[in-house]
Image (cartoon, rainbow, N blue to C red):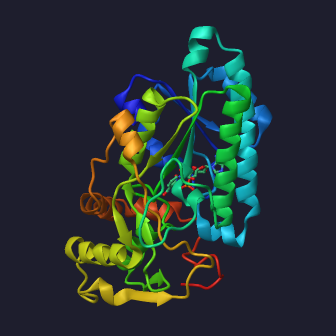
Amino acid sequence: MLVRDTDLTVVNVDKLTYAGNLESLAELDGDPRYHFEHGDICDAGRMADVFARYQPDAVVHLAAESHVDRSIDAPSEFIRTNVLGTFTLLQASRRHWRSMPDARRSAFRFVHVSTDEVFGSLGPTGSFSETTAYAPNSPYSATKAGSDHLVRAWHHTYGLPTIVTNCSNNYGPYQFPEKLIPLMIQHALAGKRMPVYGAGENVRDWLYVDDHAAALRRVLEQGRAGETYSVGGRSERRNVDVVRALCRLMDELAPSASIPRRESLIEFVADRPGHDQRYAIDASKIERELGWKPQETFESGLRKTVQWYLANQPWCERVQSGAYRGERLGKGIAI
Ligand SMILES: NC(=O)c1ccc[n+]([C@@H]2O[C@H](COP(=O)([O-])OP(=O)(O)OC[C@H]3O[C@@H](n4cnc5c(N)ncnc54)[C@H](O)[C@@H]3O)[C@@H](O)[C@H]2O)c1
């Protein structure tokens, strides 16, 4: 989005874990305003080298381990990347920021991209906002909460111009098929059973990925240093309703003679340990202060997403590494 819609130069630093894939950005190959650097944010020497060579005006920090089920099975990589990696990036940014000439120094931004999961779980009513107390419940959300605190401290202690965003569940093209929506599309297409945790009553506030990207751009360009912004789609849905909506779309867009109603594939499985019941975001601050609001409804975004996955099956097949075979992580039960 930045390369397409602005004249900025973008340096993409990525370790290319199982979740990273250069094919997703193949359309930028050869663009003089796009550079890819294969690197680990925990590697201080490598980060210093990248900062020295590119002299960035801003850092947008998205790199993370992000899948809750994986964090339950193997938390150490989450501690390493999310906590130590954020620390390493903050230190590299601070050194670089201190060395900048005054005019560029005051405009520098470190935008830390975080999640609503740091706030824990809601009951049937209410919503998270910038003033909600932190109460993370999973190893993933605990490490993201830790990284948010580091970012806050680097602003208050060292004056680094940081901003934190806490966004709700994303969905859309190019999402690794381990997250709910792309996983269910793949299962529906293959005629495999569609496992839903518990009774499918958990509620998430869904946001189309381009709307999240537009929010991050708004924060980068207009956000106030030291602030946090909650980002959400005002699209609360129960998991079972998300999967049912997806089944209906699949029946319409990819009809199957052998399975005329994909809903018959839905199967309720034992719940994820410590599964948060409900997330919802009050996005009034970013709407009011930065004039951002989502462009997609859940219905329009889901339709676009299903269409994209149907048209990009070769991408899905290639990104599904050997390490990920559709197993249910978190309790070690295959689905
Ligand atoms: N997906 C969501 O619903 C959602 C919602 C809110 C916030 N977020 C946050 O947005 C960010 C991106 O999420 P995502 O869903 O794209 O995650 P993802 O897991 O799909 O991708 C993470 C990316 O980070 C890279 N990476 C991992 N460890 C790294 C390391 N040590 N050094 C360099 N690169 C590394 C991976 O290769 C991959 O490209 C994360 O910080 C996540 O917490 C995501």
Residue that protrudes farthest toward the right in the picture: 45
Across and down, in percent, residue 57 comes to 56, 22
Which residue occupies 77% across, 61% down? 76
Which residue occupies 62% across, 9% down? 102
Q: Quadrant of the N terminus?
A: top left
- Relative placement, left or right, of 11 versus 152 is left
Q: Does any portion of residue 91 appear in the rendered image?
A: yes
Q: Does any portion of residue 322 appear in the rendered image?
A: no
- Relative placement, left or right, of 103 versus 128 is right
Residue that protrudes farthest toward the left in the picture: 252
Q: Nearer the viewer, residue 224 or 80?
A: 224
Q: Quadrant of residue 315?
A: bottom left
Across and down, in percent, residue 218 comes to 41, 34
Q: Is 186 placed above or below 25 here?
A: below
- Relative placement, left or right, of 77 versus 60 is right
- Relative placement, left or right, of 181 versus 16 is left
Q: Nearer the viewer, residue 133 or 42?
A: 133
Q: Is 205 placed above or below 287 here?
A: below
Q: Is 301 placed above or below 29 here?
A: below
Q: Nearer the viewer, residue 238 or 135?
A: 135
Which residue occupies 37% across, 46% down? 284
Across and down, in percent, residue 224 comes to 50, 29
Across and down, in percent, residue 287 comes to 35, 41
Number of on-image labels: 0
Q: Quadrant of residue 250?
A: bottom left
